[in-house]
């Protein structure tokens, strides 16, 4: 794939903040339009490209969110990028926090912190991977590849609604930084702050500071406790009330007879 020079304003903002990045952001490649940054990043990782590579697009024609949902990515309206992450191999222990298990939570927290530093807006987090400011503002998706093998990697995809535009996949349920600020924000500054925050939060995971990530996530997850939810598991259709998240990032739901841990799968917020 052919890449283009970064937009000038974005390049300048990244250059100003480059000293704050670590090896967790090593190179940023840009293209005006592509189907999905996640797919391109995955292909590049399979081809041997390194940890910390970022694929940034001005528009996605087939952007996606969790469980196959579409992520509307109109041209010039948002920040659409994916990072290649090569976490260390580790034995998975059920019920114990881990780098892999907390990847989405760390990424969502980093996006919220970066937006806050760049704009002053304090977005709230919704389990497992959305950011809201009244309405949906951004989303995060982490997809593991070759998990458990020496060549394992994770692609962390991020979509942030920056400028006001018709976000078709969200209709009236979406908002943007521009709408909430009342003025167009600086996309380069937002991107630089998000990447800087990601470097810090991912390093927390590598250092085993899982509790720091979870606690900071909890502070921003306003409205998490006491919400009625429904989901389906091996026992069929179930309902309950949220009580929070545990140390592994799993959602805790009180059914009235037991507290259930939900670590994956679709949850319908009621």
Image (cartoon, helix red, strand yellow):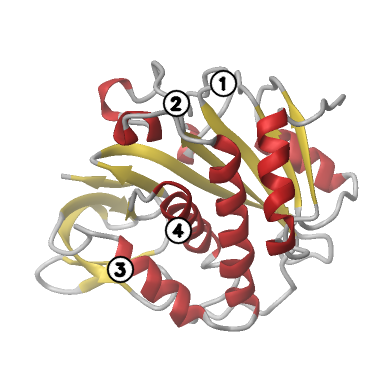
Horizontal placement of 25 versus 100: left or right?
right
Secondary-structure class at tag 3: helix
Residue annotated with mark 2: 163
The alpha-carbon separation of the residues under discs 3 and 4 comes to: 12 Å
Residue annotated with mark 3: 219
Q: Which of marks 1 and 4 precedes in the sequence? A: 1
Location of residue 5 in the rendering, given as x and y in whole percent from the top left corner: 81, 28
Asked whether the viewer can see residue 157, the reply is no
| Tag 1–tag 2 contact (CB < 8 Å) | yes
Q: Nearer the viewer, residue 163 or 222?
A: 163
What is the quadrant of residue 144 in the picture? bottom right
The alpha-carbon separation of the residues under discs 2 and 3 comes to: 27 Å
Residue annotated with mark 1: 76
Q: Which of marks 2 and 4 precedes in the sequence? A: 4
Q: Residue furthest left?
A: 256
Q: Nearer the viewer, residue 246 or 158?
A: 158
Q: Could you tell me which residue is drawn at 35 percent across and 55 percent down? A: 127
How many residues crowd around disc 3 within 10 Å: few (fewer than 14), some, or many (20 or more)?
few
Q: Could you tell me which residue is drawn at 25 percent across and 69 percent down? A: 244
The quadrant of the image that shows the N terminus is top right
The alpha-carbon separation of the residues under discs 1 and 3 comes to: 32 Å
The quadrant of the image that shows the C terminus is top left
Residue annotated with mark 4: 113
Horizontal placement of 98 versus 223: left or right?
right
Secondary-structure class at tag 2: loop
């Amino acid at each position: 794939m052919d890449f283009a020079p970064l937009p000038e304003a974005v390049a300048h903002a990244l250059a100003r903040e480059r000293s704050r990045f670590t090896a967790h952001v090593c190179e940023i490649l840009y293209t005006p339009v592509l189907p999905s940054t996640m797919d391109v990043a995955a292909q590049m990782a399979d081809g041997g490209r390194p940890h910390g590579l970022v694929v940034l697009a001005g528009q996605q024609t087939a952007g996606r969110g969790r469980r196959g949902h579409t992520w509307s990515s109109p041209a010039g309206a948002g920040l659409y990028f994916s990072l290649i992450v090569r976490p260390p191999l580790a034995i998975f222990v059920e019920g114990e926090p881990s780098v892999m298990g907390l990847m989405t939570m760390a990424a969502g927290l980093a996006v919220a912190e970066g937006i806050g530093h760049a704009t002053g807006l304090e977005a709230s987090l919704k389990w497992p991977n959305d950011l809201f400011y009244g309405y949906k503002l951004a989303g995060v998706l982490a997809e593991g590849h070759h998990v458990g093998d020496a060549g394992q990697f994770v692609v962390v995809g991020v979509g942030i609604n920056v400028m006001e535009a018709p976000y078709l996949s969200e209709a009236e349920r979406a908002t943007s930084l521009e709408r909430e600020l009342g003025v167009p924000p600086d996309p380069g500054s937002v991107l630089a702050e998000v990447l800087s925050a990601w470097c810090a939060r991912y390093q927390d995971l590598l250092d085993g500071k899982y509790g720091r990530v979870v606690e900071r996530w909890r502070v921003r997850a306003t409205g998490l406790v006491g919400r009625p939810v429904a989901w389906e598991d091996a026992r069929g259709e179930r309902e309950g009330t949220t009580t929070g998240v545990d140390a592994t990032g799993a959602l805790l739901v009180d059914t009235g007879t037991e507290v259930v841990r939900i670590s994956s799968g679709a949850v319908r917020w009621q």
